[in-house]
Amino acid sequence: MKRFSVVILLICCFLFVAGTALAVPRGMTLTWKGGGMGQVTFSGTVHAKAGLQCSACHPSIFLFMPAATGVKITMKEINAGKYCGACHNGSKAFSAQDPNNCAKCHKMPSS
């Protein structure tokens, strides 16, 4: 039983370290293709300036880095409080459901 507990502890530590290692650091910006609203931009600097550390989202909200794994995040999931919607709910941060905030994340390509 003691050996099993040690193995579980090691796995948890690995997941925590892996999750924070995959976080987007200050100064780095990631972009995703996005849908009809244009590409989605995530800025590590903007989030760091808001006082957030990597551990605020990794690994509790994002166990993975979506851009690296190809996981598709939808507005339906965000509006349901998953992924970015865990904070972008109008209480912790601007609401992702407010149409006036779309351009804060979605950027239309320049013509």
Image (cartoon, rainbow, N blue to C red):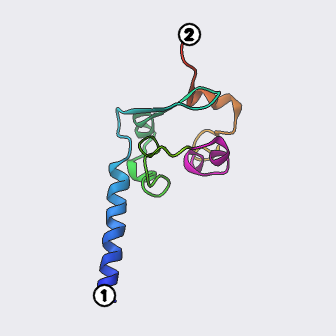
Residue at image coords 53%, 30%: 33
Q: What amino acid is at disc 2?
A: Ser
- In this rendered view, identify the residue nearer to me: 84 or 46: 84
Amino acid type at image mark 1: Lys
Secondary structure at badge 1 equals helix
Say which label, 1 or 2, has the lower sequence index: 1
Residue 25, magenta (yes or no): no
Task: Give the overall secondary structure of the magenta segment.
Answer: helix
Quarter holding the N terminus? bottom left
Q: Position of residue 72 (x, y in %)?
A: 55, 43
Which numbered disc covers residue 59? none
Q: Which residue is denoted by mark 1 in the rendering?
A: 2
Q: What separation in Å lies between label 1 and label 2 (alpha carbons)? A: 62 Å
Residue depicted at x 42% and y 43%: 51
In the image, residue 51 above or below residue 62: above
Q: Position of residue 5 (x, y in %)?
A: 34, 82
Quadrant of image for the C terminus: top right
Q: Residue at x 44, y 55 (%)?
A: 63
Q: Is residue 21 above or below residue 102?
A: below
Q: Crowdedness of circle 1 by 10 Å Cα count: few (<14), some, many (20+)?
A: few
Name the quadrant containing residue 38. Answer: top right
Disc 2 secondary structure class: loop
Which region of the structure is painted magenta?
Answer: 73-87
Residue at 40 percent of width and 39 percent of height: 48
> To which residue does mark 2 refer?
111
Which quadrant of the structure image shows residue 4? bottom left
* Dot 2 crowding, Cα within 10 Å, few <14, some 14–19, many 20+: few
